[in-house]
Image (cartoon, rainbow, N blue to C red):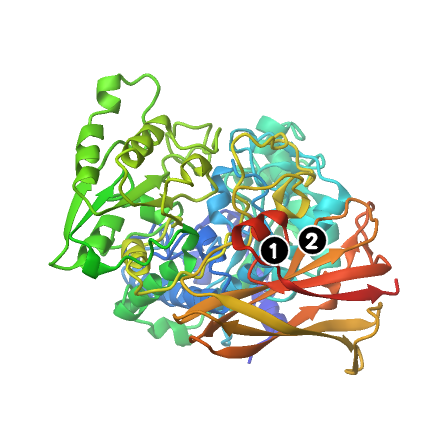
């Protein structure tokens, strides 16, 4: 099997045959053909966030934030394997017809492993949530699934956006994220480091913003000192799209395109999504960059093309046929993924619905019969979208009548006349009055939260300005609740919203995210008890009137469950099931570097924590539980977090069944990060918590129970 060195040598040999002009031309995302060398054109820009995106038909899985809610990296890896197969199948079909256009390549600019630090960020839906460990585990699984373990990469994954990037969208081209060494190393960088060192991600994408004064796509600190020297990254770096142009147009660290392109390539940004690298040769003529530096980047990008087997006619993946796209097995996986992603926030016993006791179901709301509420952003297309209404109708069967009303638009601007805003309210009330139970489908869609410039959304360039629903939806909910029928609130969104004002009156609340092509069917299966919800929140659900730090403040103080000083509406890691689980007999072992283990003292030479706990299904329905493990330092420390997730494991149990669950936890997760950004092991007492939620006050209020725990000591 070929090694990294073999692929690099092939790339070096090819690049040596190029003129410097030809080598520079290959550093643009739309790389032209070099016919005299037998090099075909290649467009590097492809997307695969939750399915092959923007390239026609593909299996559309739930948005990334939904897959984070599944807390199931093993399943996420299988999902990514499906995406890789479909990506190869579509690439093979396109190339056979001479189509080498955008979104047809094998270099997928996914996953997005930025930390969802603020609920207002429109692109938070693309991430794996607010926690570094959850993000790391999901990101590694996704990369491993995309890239495969064959002689060649099945597809090339890309970790983005490096680094400290999470809004505000409106300022991203000019913004300077000021980040302390502690927050940088404790929160913003760990997932990137894990994807580079453990998952061997092939590419890293720089962010639009500056971090501590340096533009991320030309940052010596990020790209040279940390990524290449400290972490040993051997792949290629790509700029975010037109981010290099921002150097001179918005960040004002350079004066023109030649300077910007030269700075980026010198710092190791090898590939330009955009057109600024067209001015690289001007930089060469002005002495701003060397021919050696241009060729270095060309070698890196061609190494990736060789690793993908693009110059080998016998590459095993060339035989993947187009018929692999959107096959039945993949569609079933999209359904399973949607079931795993949904989070049951409240249930007073209304769910699961008993079909024998129902004659009429009312399905109401702007997201009931909405395809945009299923796909989120960076999505592919499906020819089998199943909306919430479609899924409920199908599972309700012939004996139950399903009534439907849109109720209102997903968004009603303040300038619209009242007659337009309440056009469907009376119909919706009539549906509720004539129904035994109401499924009220509200929330947002990709036209309301997303990326700056992508849509004409009514919020600020993709970000939310409030955690409340649009006014027209708030009016609709109040009108439906006032009817007095049992109501299930279903929320489709890519982020947290505050619907706490309706919590007491609603019988059940389900967070459905942007649930993918089979989202409506998955919702219906949960409503009728065909599937048992198992998702947990990957983000904190705040109250609207909670005082969040300024959006532009990148300090973690007061943010996310780790540093939150107030009670949340629904906490990170929270989610209900139709069954119940009990934890008992926790055990903790410290595995030393020599393989020996002890239970006495954690110290610098411990390699791993081995944690065991018995989990039992004490209810009456088979269900999956997320066993969550948190760590809290009991002493005084610089900016000590409340507690932090250090491991989790999904386990499925039949009624009455017990399983002994073992967690293997890297010792580095016990360490903290000091003010100087360096790892530190604080001496003293630590508490390890094991359960189906985090050990916070709000979780105890909601669940009426506490995780089991063990105490141990560190010797420093």
Tell me where residue 414 appears, x and y as whole percent.
35, 19
Location of mark 2 (residue): 643
Q: How crowded is mark 1: few (under 14 residues within 10 Å), some or many (20 or more)?
A: many
Tell me: 255 left or right of 53. right
Q: Give the quarter of the image for residue 331.
A: bottom left
Residue contact between numbered discs 2 and 1, judged by CB atoms under 8 Å:
yes
Judge whether residue 17 can be spotted in this image. no
Q: In this view, does 170 lie above or below 4?
A: above
Q: Does residue 442 appear to the left or right of 256 in the view shown? A: left
Q: Tag 1 or tag 2, which sits nearer the N-term?
A: 2
Rendering coords of residue 231 (x, y %):
71, 59
**In the rendered image of this protein, does residue 538 appear above or below residue 569?**
below
Look at the picture and state if 389 lies above or below 70. above
Which of these two is toward me, 347 or 282?
347
Q: How crowded is mark 2: few (under 14 residues within 10 Å), some or many (20 or more)?
A: many
Give coordinates of residue 689: x percent, y percent. 67, 62
Q: Residue at x 42, y 76 (%)?
A: 654
Judging from the image, what secondary structure is the residue with disc 1 in?
loop
Quarter where residue 13 is shown: bottom right
The residue identified by callout 1 is: 694
Secondary structure of residue under mark 2: loop
Q: Where is residue 461 in the image (x, y as percent from the top left)?
A: 46, 30
Residue at x 30% of width, y 56% of height: 527
Q: Residue at x 26, y 42 (%)?
A: 485
Answer whether residue 283 is visible to the viewer in this image.
yes
Q: Which residue appears at 84% of the width and 64% of the height?
A: 714
């Amino acid at each position: 099997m070929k090694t990294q060195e073999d692929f690099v040598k092939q790339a070096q040999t090819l690049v040596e045959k190029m003129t410097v002009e030809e080598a520079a031309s290959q550093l643009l995302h739309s790389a032209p053909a070099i016919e005299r060398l037998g090099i075909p054109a290649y467009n590097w820009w492809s997307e695969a966030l939750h399915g092959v995106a923007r390239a026609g038909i593909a299996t559309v899985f739930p948005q990334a934030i939904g897959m984070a809610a599944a807390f199931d990296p093993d399943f996420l890896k299988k999902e990514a394997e499906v995406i890789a197969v479909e990506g190869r199948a579509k690439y093979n079909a396109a190339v056979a017809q001479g189509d080498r256009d955008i979104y047809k390549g094998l270099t997928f600019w996914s996953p997005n492993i930025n930390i969802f630090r603020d609920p207002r960020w429109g692109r938070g839906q693309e991430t794996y949530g607010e926690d570094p460990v959850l993000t790391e585990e999901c990101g590694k699984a996704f990369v491993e699934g995309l890239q495969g373990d064959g002689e060649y990469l099945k597809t090339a994954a890309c970790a983005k956006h490096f680094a400290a990037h999470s809004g505000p969208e409106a300022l991203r081209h000019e913004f300077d994220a000021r980040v302390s060494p502690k927050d940088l190393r404790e929160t913003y960088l760990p997932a990137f480091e894990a994807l580079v060192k453990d998952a061997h991600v092939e590419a890293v994408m720089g962010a639009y913003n500056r971090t501590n004064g340096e533009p991320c796509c030309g940052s010596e600190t990020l790209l040279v000192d940390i990524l290449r020297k400290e972490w040993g990254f051997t792949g290629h770096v790509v700029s975010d799209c037109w981010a290099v142009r921002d150097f001179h147009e918005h960040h004002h660290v350079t004066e023109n395109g030649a300077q910007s392109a030269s700075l980026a390539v010198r710092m190791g940004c090898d590939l330009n999504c955009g057109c600024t690298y067209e001015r690289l040769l001007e930089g060469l003529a002005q002495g701003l960059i060397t021919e050696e530096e241009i060729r270095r980047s060309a070698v890196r990008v061609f190494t990736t093309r060789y690793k993908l087997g693009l110059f080998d006619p016998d590459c095993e993946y060339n035989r993947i046929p187009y018929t692999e796209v959107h096959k039945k097995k993949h569609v079933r996986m999209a359904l399973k993924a949607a079931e795993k992603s949904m989070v049951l926030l409240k249930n007073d016993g209304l769910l699961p619905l008993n079909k024998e006791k129902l004659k009429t179901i009312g399905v109401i709301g702007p997201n009931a019969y909405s395809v945009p509420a299923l796909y989120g952003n960076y999505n592919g297309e499906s020819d089998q979208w199943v909306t919430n209404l479609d899924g409920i109708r199908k599972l309700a069967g012939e004996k139950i009548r399903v009534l439907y009303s849109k109720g209102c638009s997903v968004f009603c601007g303040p300038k619209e006349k009242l007659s337009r805003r309440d056009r469907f309210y009376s119909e919706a009330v009539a549906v509720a009055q004539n129904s035994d139970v109401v499924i009220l489908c509200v929330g947002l869609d990709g036209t309301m939260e997303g990326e700056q410039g992508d849509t004409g959304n009514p919020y600020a360039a993709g970000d939310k300005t409030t955690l409340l629903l649009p006014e027209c939806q708030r009016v609709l909910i109040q009108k439906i609740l006032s009817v007095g029928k049992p109501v299930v609130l279903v929320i489709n969104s890519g982020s947290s919203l505050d619907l706490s004002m309706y919590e007491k009156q609603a019988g059940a609340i389900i967070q459905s995210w942007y649930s993918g092509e089979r989202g409506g069917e998955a919702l219906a299966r949960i409503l009728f008890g065909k599937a048992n919800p198992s998702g947990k929140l990957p983000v904190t659900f705040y109250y609207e009137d909670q005082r969040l730090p300024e959006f532009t403040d990148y300090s973690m103080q007061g943010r996310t469950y780790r540093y939150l000083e107030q009670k949340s509406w629904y906490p990170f890691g929270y989610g209900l099931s139709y069954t119940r689980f009990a934890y008992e007999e926790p055990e903790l072992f410290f595995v030393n570097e020599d393989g020996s283990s002890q239970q006495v003292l954690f110290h610098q030479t411990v390699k791993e924590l081995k944690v065991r706990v018995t989990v039992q299904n004490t209810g009456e329905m088979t269900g999956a539980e997320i066993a969550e493990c948190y760590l809290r330092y009991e002493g005084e420390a610089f900016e000590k977090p409340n507690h932090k997730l250090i491991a989790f494991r999904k386990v499925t149990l039949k009624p009455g069944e017990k399983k002994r669950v073992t967690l293997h936890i890297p010792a580095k997760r016990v360490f903290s990060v000091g003010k100087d950004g360096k790892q530190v092991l604080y001496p003293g007492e630590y508490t390890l918590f094991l359960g189906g939620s985090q050990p916070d006050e709000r979780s105890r209020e909601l669940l009426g129970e506490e995780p089991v725990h063990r105490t141990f000591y560190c010797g420093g």
